[in-house]
Image: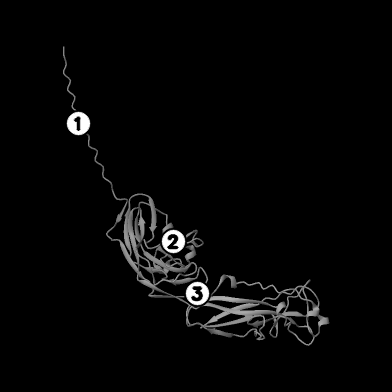
Amino acid sequence: MKFLVSVFLGWLSLVSSVEAVCYFDNAVQSQFSISMPSTLNIARDAPVGAELWSSGWVEGPSTNIRCLSTGNVSGLLASGIGAAVPGFSSNGYNSVFKTNVEGVGVSVYWCNNYASSCNTNYNNVTPIASLSWSVNPYAYSLKISWWVRLVKTGSIAPVNSLALSGVNQIRYHDLVVANLSMVGQVGINVSACEVSPQSSNITVALPNVLRSDFNNSMSVLDDSVKAKSFEISMLCEGGINVHYQVDGAASGDALRNIEGPGMATGVGIMLFRGDQGSQIVLPLGQKIFHGATSGKSIVKIPLTAKYYKTAATNREITGGDVSVVAVFTLFYE
């Protein structure tokens, strides 16, 4: 007996629907912009890490969302912001990032609260590039606040302007809930003077001398071979009036030798304006006008250190080391 078995082959269609993890709940994406300053005046001698400008916490539009599963909050820096600058952190994360101006960095922070309730210490705030907060399947009423800072990160290159193009974003899962644009071009003016690194801490080594080198009738050891010249060097913009002042433990205009075992007595150091042949004493504790700059240039202040007899006679001088400390203060107007 024969049997006919018919086998019917068909297609099984599997239809799946993908539901949004987070979505706006009767609301829309928060769009906000911060106007950057039109001009930024930066002192050349401003220390690295100095805050050049800050928006403070400013509030953007609020929004409402609803999430259906767990996940994370994340942030994305604008396309016009570069890599992290080493050595700067907030809350344990890289916090300052490169701009198109060498020596000027930017920080961007976000707070899910009213501006008045956000943490005003940026060191305790996570920068948006490192956000990784937990999201649960809840409804969220988001209060959007932003903070932008400009920070000195090093020597500032001469450029026409600073611009931060693109949009900073905050996401709950893959839903972009808030955008921030930084609007405007910032003119960079680098003013005044910046002391060169080699002049920031100078050690002047004078040659050894004998007690017999001093003359009873003369306080200054005016032998150019036994003196030592040095200079304060700085980079200044044009139109700057450069003044300076030197201070230290002194007797009159002579810097006193440090007291202690092994230190000479009856001898100090006197500073002179100019080279080793100069007879112009540098008065201590007085503001001195050096000159005016006509254009961006290297300014050098030449000085000379000479031994000075503080004892009444040579016989009262005792041998030992001579070490004095002078503090140089720069003024520019």
For mark 3, what is the residue?
Answer: 44
Which residue is drawn at the image coordinates 33% and 59% (left, top)?
177
Q: Quadrant of the N terminus?
A: top left
Report, in whole angstroms, how far the alpha carbon at label 1 lies from the one at label 3.
79 Å
Callout count: 3
Residue 314, located in which quarter of the rendered image? Answer: bottom right
Q: Helix, strand or loop at disc 1?
A: loop
Q: Residue furthest bottom?
A: 217
Report, in whole angstroms, how far the alpha carbon at label 3 lies from the one at label 2.
27 Å
Residue 10 bears which disc, if any? 1
- Choose the circle earlier in sequence order: 1 or 2: 1
Instruction: Specify the amino acid type for callout 1.
Output: Gly
Height in image: 64 above or below 189?
A: above
Q: Helix, strand or loop at disc 2?
A: loop
Instruction: Specify the amino acid type for callout 2.
Output: Pro
User: Measured from the top left, where is residue 198 in percent x and y?
Assistant: 59, 70
- Choose the circle earlier in sequence order: 3 or 2: 3
Which residue is drawn at the image coordinates 37% and 63% (left, top)?
80
Q: Tell me, yes or no, whether the two marked residues, 1 and 3, touch with CB atoms within 8 Å.
A: no
Q: Nearer the viewer, residue 42 or 240?
A: 240
Which residue is drawn at the image coordinates 43% and 63% (left, top)?
98
For mark 2, what is the residue?
Answer: 127
Q: 10 Å neighbourhood of mark 2: few (<14), some, or many (≥20)?
A: many
Residue 306 bears which disc, if any? none
Can residue 40 be spotted in the picture?
Answer: yes
